[in-house]
Amino acid sequence: MAQNTGGFGYLLKESLAEIGDLAEAIRRIGTGGSVIDPTVVACLLHRNRATAPVDTLPHREHEILAFIAEGRSNEATARHLTVSGKTVETHVRNVFSKLGLESNIVDHRRVLAVLTYLRA
């Protein structure tokens, strides 16, 4: 499709209920347009992805990750959730662990956690 400069069409015969629909598709293709069956488009756009690590986080850890993504500190998160700072620290460590973000001197785990969150 990407290399085709003329008209292009792909229709499923099951989708053509009326002859007028077929005639319109042929006219559109004849003038250089494109016609693709909606069922084909839906299949192409459907994302079959494995479950992302973020999807497996319990509700509270997902909530903590959302606060990290908002740029909140552990202290601000603790105040907002009315829990202790120690509790937030434990959740943050669990999030890092479940996302496979091990401590090292090269990477900033909070930033990597946010990127993982945004990609999910």
Image (cartoon, rainbow, N blue to C red):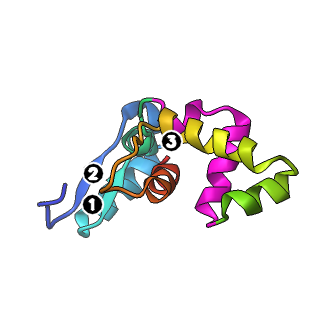
The residue segment tinted magenta is 51-71
For disc 2, the marked residue is 9
Task: Judge whether residue 88 is colored magenta.
Answer: no
> Of 113 and 36, which appears nearest the observer?
113
Instruction: Quadrant for residue 37, please give it.
Output: top left
At label 1, which amino acid type do we have? Ile
Image location (x, y in percent) of residue 107: 35, 56
Q: Residue at x 83, y 58 (%)?
A: 80
- Name the side, left or right, on which 70 lies relative to 39: right
Q: Residues within 10 Å of mark 1 (few under 14, many from 20)?
A: some
Measure the alpha-carbon separation of dots 2 and 3: 48 Å
**Can you tell which mark lies on residue 96?**
3
- Name the side, left or right, on which 110 lies relative to 67: left
Q: Is residue 76 above or below residue 63?
A: below
- Which of pointers 2 and 3 lies earlier in the amino acid sequence? 2
Image location (x, y in percent) of residue 18: 50, 42
At label 2, which amino acid type do we have? Gly
Quarter that holds the N terminus: bottom left
- Name the side, left or right, on which 51 lies relative to 33: right
For disc 1, the marked residue is 29
Mark 2 and mark 1 residues within 8 Å of each other at the beta carbon: yes
Judged by depth in the image, the label closer to the viewer, 1 or 3, is 3
Mark 1 and mark 3 residues within 8 Å of each other at the beta carbon: no
- Which of pointers 1 and 3 lies earlier in the amino acid sequence? 1
